[in-house]
Image (tube, rainbow, N blue to C red):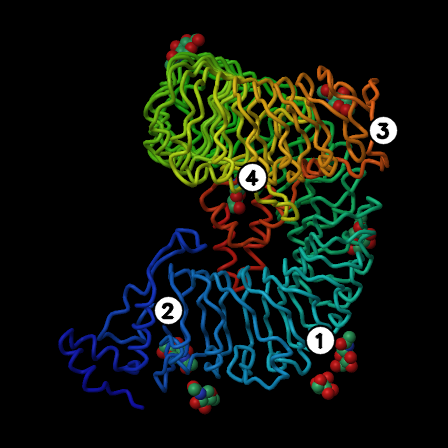
Amino acid sequence: MGFLPSNYQLTICLLYSLIFCFSSSSAHLCHNDESTALLQFKQLFSFNCSACDCPSYLSAPFTDNWKEGTDCCAWDGVTCDNTTSHVIGLDLNCNCLYGTIHPNSSLFNLVHLQHLDLSENNFNHSQILPSFGRFTNLTHLNLSLSYLSGPIQPSEEEVWQGNNFSNSIFHLQKLQELRLGGNRELTGKLPSFINGTLWHLRHLRSLDLSEIDFTGELPNSIGQLEYLEVLGLAACNFSGTIPRSLTNLTRLISLGLGGNNWINGQFPSSIGHLKNLEELFLNDCNFFGTIPTWLGNLKKLRMLDLGGNNLINGQFPSSIGHLKNLEYLYLSDCNFSGTIPRSLTNLTQLIWLYLSSNNFEGPIPQLFSNFSQLQSIDFSNNQLTGPIPSSITGLPHLQDLNLGSNSINGTIPPSLFHLVNLTYLDLSSNNLSDTVELDTFAKLEYLDSLVLSHSGLSLTTTNSTHSSFRNIRTLRLSSCNINKIPEFLKTRMELLEALDLSNNHLDEELNPLCILHSLIYLDLSNNQFGGLIPTCLGNFSGTLTVLNLQSNNFHGTIPQTFGYTSTLQELDISHNGLQGVLPRSLANCMNLKILNLGHNFIEDAFPFWLENLPQLKIIVLRDNKFHGPIEQPRKRLAFTNLHIIDMSHNEFTGTLPSIYFESMHSMMMDDEGKSLNYMHIGYGYYSVNIMNKGLEMTLVRIITIFKAVDFSHNKFDGKIPISIGRLKALHVLNFSRNGFTGPIPLSLVNLAELESLDLSQNKLFGEIPQQLTSLTFLEVFDVSQNNLTGIIPRGQQFETFSNISYGGNAGLCGFPLSKECKTPKIAESPSLPSSSSHNYECRLDGFGWEAVSMGYGCGAVFGLVIGSCIIRRKEEWLARIFRLKMCHQKNRSNEVRYQHGAR
Ligand SMILES: *[C@@H]1O[C@H](CO)[C@@H](O)[C@H](O)[C@H]1NC(C)=O
Ligand SMILES: *[C@@H]1O[C@H](CO)[C@@H](O)[C@H](O)[C@H]1NC(C)=O
Ligand SMILES: *[C@@H]1O[C@H](CO)[C@@H](O)[C@H](O)[C@H]1NC(C)=O
Ligand SMILES: *[C@@H]1O[C@H](CO)[C@@H](O)[C@H](O)[C@H]1NC(C)=O
Ligand SMILES: *[C@@H]1O[C@H](CO)[C@@H](O)[C@H](O)[C@H]1NC(C)=O
Ligand SMILES: *[C@@H]1O[C@H](CO)[C@@H](O)[C@H](O)[C@H]1NC(C)=O
Ligand SMILES: *[C@@H]1O[C@H](CO)[C@@H](O)[C@H](O)[C@H]1NC(C)=O
Ligand SMILES: *[C@@H]1O[C@H](CO)[C@@H](O)[C@H](O)[C@H]1NC(C)=O
């Protein structure tokens, strides 16, 4: 193979330019077949950056300069060998490729490849094909975050059955780096490395299988990969114990085992021998007990994450004081108590220090003077008291300061305003007592997020329109005693995305805010804003996602403009004085998830025309003047995604069309057992008032598994449709105060999740079905004021209901009523109530699975962070770390890139 171009290429060269030809011939010209293979490969994909998990500023279809007739060795992403001119490297990371890789793809003709990086594209559930085995000289393979699915490799059984898998990815003997992390649809069992299928991989230096959905255990033979320097096994769904053989991996520099279900609960002592470790992630591992002293041996550690483990004795490990090279320390959510430990003073190299969500108490120590490198502090969600220390000024590099959700009191030290590099400041939910001019914070000119909600501070605003909040993106000032909209908000704030002025004393008109065109999130709830809802809010330039105007004094009709932008996901205009009909333009809000119109004077028929909004999860029409019958749905599939429907306190009439309940698929799906997620939109968690268990309560964060139907206080009549029994996932069902007749449908027995069932004040007759005793989660049961007869069922939860549940039914008898039944009673065996209510309060505080899974969910996180949708910093921080280390263990320059990426 020479340096002379082939005839074909020569001709093309002449056609294009001689200069090109000469300049390139002095280096190398690619082989025809390889050039063709690359072009064919490119052809198979569409370029769809939104389908991929890359931040927009990294996404680029750089195959743009792949043109027929040019030297492919000069193409972006392609590397050729200097002597043979064969393509030996292909780097298409973040190239917006969308499409499937087929077994006969021309990609596999590039057999000389040594480096192949196709990560962070979307291969649309492609499998990891045996054809990858053709790249016999491959040393580096990165397919992470690229939507691959299917079995990770053939099962051990298949191998022993003599099937020929010599062509698989796991037979690439020269492989030094294998990265498949972030492909959550890959499944299977990780086989033995000794002489199983993975024997050939024993030369690996870097292995990342994070987030692959493995079954079974991590094989002990992992200890055979003696050259490993990087091992990423975060969130791999491993059970069992951490193999002792890890002891042998003494070259390890970076180890991530977080987010698995390890069973033995102790920190594995084998890790204490890995003296070269610089990065260690053992977060969210179900470990309990104490942090072992061997940790102090790992002197090279720069990054340590033990967060999310339930350490029992609450003692902060003094061994951490020996890790003088620590730069990043994450000990959030570890059950620590006591004061913030002195041993931290030794860690003078610290850059990030996260101690959030523990039980630390007492004042914040004046130890800051030691930490001149600190950029990020998170002490949020503890019980810290006392003032913000004035020594904070000794942290010139501080960028993020989160002291939210503590009991910090006193005033804001003037030194805080000397931290000119601050970009994120959260003092929310504290007991500060100070009156501060909002503009004072503008001295911090790089500030992009200012969160002072519920801090105790009173903010005054000046009439100055000039403000230097030039970089502000998030401004959250709920409950800050503000009397007047700051003038600067009435000027162009090009970057402002999230504005929360809820719970203040604002009583102006909203029109001046129409200038805030880039808003994504606007919460003005609980003020005294009056007048009409400005039409501009309906057509903000295609960005507004959340609009909350709850509990103000708006009147007039809802503007027809809603629906002009389809970005709107949450619209809450409840508790106002709005009248008229609903604007039909709402039917265009294809992304609408939450619609709360409760407590107004809206006069309209049932909005069946919302039935095909595919995302609609919560609809609240409560306490309005909606009237008339619920007509049959126009579409066969109506309201399929609904989780909560509240039509109570209106004037609806007629019978309930059975067919609606047959298409509410989300209410049929029992999501129990799936991880608990909160329903969240953009910058926050949605909350809604709901009648549950006889009380109106606010679900501050709605768990996605929570399903409720409330049709109470209307004039419905006819029978309760049997089809209601199909909504198997319902937790709350309220049909009270209507005119329903007929018997209690037996189908209710299918609602196994039901916690509250209220059928009171209707005209129901017949007996209470004995089978309802199988509803073991039922806590509230009310059938009072009907015409029911017969024996009250006994057993299970029915032993716990009082006579209030049955009053006003002359024909009922038996326990708990004093009226005895004439015939001998059937049911006895009052077994103990078998259960309490579902335990979903348990995760209402702190961060639950969502945060955890997002932490690893590199894919998901990117979308969220980059779309700047999530502002809860804990999550963002977690995201940053994992983004940084587990998903992108490439090289230093990338680390820096991603670090910025997640800001
Ligand atoms: C190939 O050539 C380039 C530029 O002349 C040089 O930077 C590179 O090190 C060479 N690579 C090899 C493997 O010789
Ligand atoms: C693989 O590498 C070896 C040694 O460098 C070389 O001789 C051989 O030609 C290469 N094979 C391919 C297909 O590039
Ligand atoms: C490899 O597997 C075979 C078959 O199961 C077994 O007989 C042999 O002992 C194994 N070798 C090692 C080193 O474990
Ligand atoms: C560690 O390596 C040694 C020597 O290579 C070997 O004998 C031992 O079995 C290994 N230990 C484990 C736990 O795999
Ligand atoms: C700080 O480090 C020194 C050794 O360099 C050690 O003796 C001391 O105990 C450490 N202090 C704390 C509080 O851990
Ligand atoms: C802000 O940060 C930069 C870079 O980290 C640093 O050089 C500068 O001194 C800091 N500013 C102040 C006032 O400390
Ligand atoms: C702050 O709280 C501490 C203890 O909780 C108390 O002793 C102190 O007086 C308080 N300071 C102010 C300014 O309220
Ligand atoms: C701001 O208000 C003060 C007094 O309330 C007044 O003297 C000043 O002229 C006002 N400035 C502007 C720009 O309106």
> Considering the numbered disc 1 on the image, is that residue within a helix, a strand or a loop?
helix
Which of the two discs, 2 and 1, sits closer to the camera? Answer: 1
Q: Distance between the residues labelled 4 and 2?
A: 48 Å
Residue under pointer 3: 824
> Considering the numbered disc 4 on the image, is that residue within a helix, a strand or a loop?
helix
Which of the two discs, 4 and 2, sits closer to the camera? Answer: 4
Residue 439 is situated, as x and y percent measured from the top left of the image, at 49, 23
Residue 726: quarter of image: top right
The amino acid type, in three-letter code, at marker 1 is Ser
Residue closer to the observer: 696 or 896: 696
Q: Which mark is residue 667?
A: 4
Residue 339: quarter of image: top right
Residue closer to the observer: 720 or 317: 720
Marks 3 and 4, the one that precedes in the sequence: 4
Residue under pointer 2: 77
Residue under pointer 1: 221
